């Protein structure tokens, strides 16, 4: 006879499949669900990923502030999560999101990846869509 | 009078803009230049990124083997790099690539992100395009 499985075990099983790093974190890529544009990369701990899956809104772990970072809590630029994927070795998470406000970056740009390498220099090639001072006030 | 800049300094300046981690590495995302599909995430050190930029082929740093990993050196599935981007805080690189053979993952799938979260379980939702035993022989 096997021991009964607690009701909540199946719910969190999938979190154990992730290869959390020594700090208990995993990098998460947010990709625009419609356009495929890579918007940003941030970190998640177990709680942030569990809350992301439960609520359908992206929640990260802020390493600088050592607290949960509910994306958009200050800016209003929340990310509605359409899909959550995990890579083959279980150490990177990929989110397909609808980016509210079309701005993911704290600089007021659509994507954090606005620097392009051109002839040995990084060039900021994407426009600032909204002044950050108007976003965070 | 300012000192003359050595001819090779401008060429590697851009590498200094990157916030390498304590192990001298940075994560690099490879994204299909045509479809926008996120194919894989691997690590780069300074030498691998310099070679990637110089040759136009993706070169990573294998943490398990502690050596440069010229993507496709065994499988033939090289990545032709169309664009190199850096994020706002300089600690993640994004490559737009043409994936030769349409297979980036060692499991024989197009992308390493083939596990999708469905009702509390990871489900491998993408097909194996080629038997790995036929890729690595």
Image (tube, coloured by chain):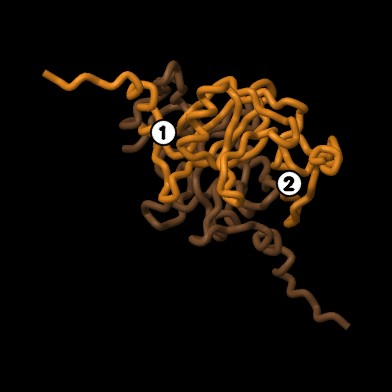
Chain colours: A orange, B brown
Chain on which label 2 sits? A
Outermost residue on the bottom side: it is B1
Mark toward the viewer: 1 or 2: 1
The structure residue drawn at horizontal position 65% and vertical position 38%, both measured from the top left corner, is: A40
B110 lies left or right of A106:
left
Report if residue B115 is visible in the image: yes
Residue B46 at x, y = what percent? Answer: 57, 60
B54 lies left or right of A133:
left
Residue B110 at x, y = what percent? Answer: 48, 27
* Image quadrant in which the N terminus of chain A is located: top left
Q: Are marks 1 and 2 in contact (CB under 8 Å)?
A: no
Of A33 and B134, nearer the camera is A33
Sooner in the amino-acid sequence: mark 1 or mark 2: 1
**Residue marked by disc 1:** A88
The structure residue drawn at horizontal position 71% and vertical position 48%, both measured from the top left corner, is: B88
The structure residue drawn at horizontal position 70% and vertical position 59%, both measured from the top left corner, is: B14
Residue B1 at x, y = what percent? Answer: 88, 83
Q: Callout 1: few (<14), some (14-19), or many (20+) C-alpha neighbours within 10 Å?
A: some
Of B135 and B118, nearer the camera is B118
User: Residue A126 sits in which quadrant?
Assistant: top right
Chain on which label 1 sits? A
Of B134 and B31, nearer the camera is B31
Q: Callout 2: few (<14), some (14-19), or many (20+) C-alpha neighbours within 10 Å?
A: many
Outermost residue on the left side: it is A1
Cα–Cα span, label 1 and label 2: 28 Å
Residue B49 at x, y = what percent? Answer: 58, 54
**Residue marked by disc 2:** A116
Element assignment for label 1: loop
């Amino acid at each position: 006879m096997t021991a009964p499985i607690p009701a909540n075990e199946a719910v969190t099983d999938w979190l154990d499949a992730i290869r959390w790093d020594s700090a208990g974190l995993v990098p998460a890529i947010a990709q625009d669900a419609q356009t495929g544009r890579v918007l940003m990369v941030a970190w998640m701990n177990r709680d942030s990923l569990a809350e992301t899956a439960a609520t359908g809104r992206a929640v990260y772990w802020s390493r600088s502030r050592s607290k949960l970072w509910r994306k958009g809590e200050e800016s209003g630029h929340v990310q509605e999560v359409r899909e959550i994927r995990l890579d083959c070795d279980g150490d990177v998470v990929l989110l397909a999101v609808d980016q509210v406000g079309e701005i993911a970056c704290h600089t007021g740009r659509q994507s954090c990846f606005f620097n392009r390498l051109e002839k040995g220099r990084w060039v900021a090639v994407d426009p600032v869509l909204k002044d950050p001072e108007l976003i965070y006030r």
